[in-house]
Image: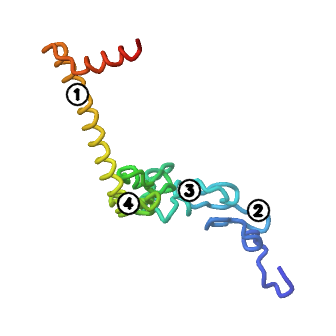
Amino acid sequence: MGVNCDRSSNLCNITQPCKNNGTCNGNHYSYNCSCPCGFNGTDCEFDHRPCKPYTCLNNGACNETSNSTFVCACLSGWQGVHCESMVNFCDNNSCLNNGVCRPLLENYKCECLGDSYSGPLCQISSAKIIIFKAVSKSFAYISILAIVAVAMFVIMMDMLKYCFGIDPTSGELERIQREKQ
């Protein structure tokens, strides 16, 4: 057909209906597509392959295990059926001193809160924190010593009065009672 009879009247040549590398067999009245494995439909338009171009994300490799199933081989740092999730390296690592763990591709980073701590795991205390801890311990020790001293004084006074019959406050109590009368 054509002005110079240089065109085929075969439907396969005119319309090229078969998609996905299907082979067209036909004449000028009808055609039939022979579809490659994994494709079907009148024009091989339906893709039933388990591994399609973007089945595995993040550059994962798709491996067919049967005609209908697949397994994605994920690159390092990725996981999931389709390699869709970044591996959370914070699950097995913990930041110290209330630092916040941020997952990164194939790693993690501890973000230290404030300027009190630093280091890869927020393990290094600033001078301010070291001094604060020392002062806090000192006050705690002094408080404990003061409580012990008061308790010992009370115990000693009770022992003098009830065990030895000596009442160091009796003279003072008599003076106060005389003033009241």
Q: Which residue is mark 3?
A: 38
The percent position of residue 27, horizontal first and vertical second, equals 74, 67
Asked if labels 1 and 2 touch by Cβ distance under 8 angstroms, the answer is: no
Q: Quadrant of residue 18?
A: bottom right
Q: Nearer the viewer, residue 51 or 8?
A: 51
Residue kind at label 1, given as amino acid type: Phe
Query: Sequence order check: which comes first, mark 3 or mark 2?
Result: 2
Q: Which disc is residue 153 wearing?
A: 1
Q: Which residue is mark 2?
A: 30
Q: Residue at x 15, y 13 (%)?
A: 165
Q: Secondary structure at mark 3?
A: loop
* Disc 4: CA contacts within 10 A as few (<14), some (14-19) or many (>=20): few
Q: Secondary structure at mark 4?
A: helix
Question: How far apart in space, not on screen, are marks 1 and 4 (Cα)?
Answer: 37 Å
The percent position of residue 47, horizontal first and vertical second, equals 61, 56
Q: Which residue is mark 4?
A: 128
Question: How far apart in space, not on screen, are marks 1 and 3 (Cα)?
Answer: 94 Å
Residue kind at label 4, given as amino acid type: Lys
Query: Sequence order check: which comes first, mark 1 or mark 4?
Result: 4
Question: How far apart in space, not on screen, are marks 4 and 3 (Cα)?
Answer: 68 Å
Q: Secondary structure at mark 1?
A: helix
Q: Which disc is residue 134 wearing?
A: none
Residue kind at label 3, given as amino acid type: Gly
Quarter of the figure with the N terminus: bottom right
